[in-house]
Image: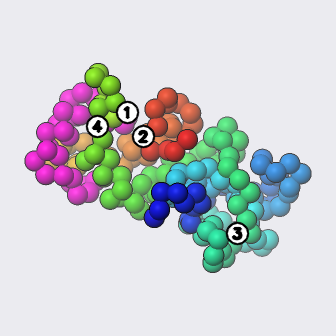
Amino acid sequence: MSADKKYEEFARVLDFLPRGRSEVIKGREGPMVEAIGEERLTLLELLAIESQSFEPGERVKIGKEGREKIVSVLGKLTYEELSPEARGSLPAVVEAVVMSSEARYVAYFNELQPLTPRLHGLELIPGIGKTFMREILETREKKPFTSFADIQERVGLRDPAKMVAKRIVEELAGDSHIALFVKR
């Protein structure tokens, strides 16, 4: 995928509002879907085709070609604009996105570098302190990690996918000054 590509091809549903009001386009009403893009982790508002229904976590095609349930992408949402239901489903849906792109997120464990002399990028992931950070650095030096299970086995880190998902939710909510995963 090219770096200059700005559009998401797929999104995961966070909430479905059959009689919704757009947050993005004032006065626009209809079946609204609040979703997160799989590639850039963008929070999006989608206009759905009438008579469709959606489940949280469902993967929908939103690219220019081949949409089946979505009329259009209305625009980006902020975390604050999400419905309470969308915020509630965000952690599980983000974890599903992380798991479905496992190699991409495992690469962070292999590639993250120090951000300042006192702070390493790995330490921004919830649950990773100085001890785990050192362990990850020493272990990846010998052989890069191949999967979340590999990280768990070799370093003893419990549920790395959930830790990454938690960090992504923090970044989406604006609770962090440094973005590791979410492009601003």
Which tag, 1 or 2, sits closer to the chain's start? 1
**Residue 162 in picture, x, y percent from top left:** 39, 46
Q: Check disc 4 and give the amino acid type.
A: Gln
Judged from the image, the secondary structure of the residue bearing numbered disc 2 is: loop
Closest to the observer: 70 or 127? 70
C-alpha distance separating marks 4 and 1: 11 Å
Q: Check disc 3 and give the amino acid type.
A: Ile
Q: Nearer the viewer, mark 4 or mark 1?
A: 4
Q: Check disc 2 and give the amino acid type.
A: Leu
* Side of 165 relative to 10 (left or right): left
Q: Nearer the viewer, mark 3 or mark 2?
A: 2
Instruction: Assess whether mark 2 and mark 3 are in contact (beta carbons under 8 angstroms).
Output: no
C-alpha distance separating marks 3 and 2: 30 Å
Which tag, 4 or 1, sits closer to the chain's start? 4
The residue labelled by disc 3 is 70
Q: Is residue 62 visible?
A: yes
**Residue 116 in picture, x, y percent from top left:** 32, 25
The residue labelled by disc 4 is 113
Above or below, 125 against 9 in this view is above
Tell me which segment is drawn in magenta. Answer: 122-150
- Toward which corner of the image does residue 111 lie, by quadrant? top left
* Side of 7 relative to 146 (left or right): right
Instruction: Assess whether mark 1 and mark 4 are in contact (beta carbons under 8 angstroms).
Output: no
The residue at the far left in this view is 142
**Residue 45 in picture, x, y percent from top left:** 70, 54
Q: Any mark on residue 124, and which?
A: 1
Q: Check disc 1 and give the amino acid type.
A: Leu
User: Which residue is found at the position 20% from the left and 40% from the top?
Assistant: 136
C-alpha distance separating marks 3 and 1: 35 Å
C-alpha distance separating marks 3 and 4: 39 Å
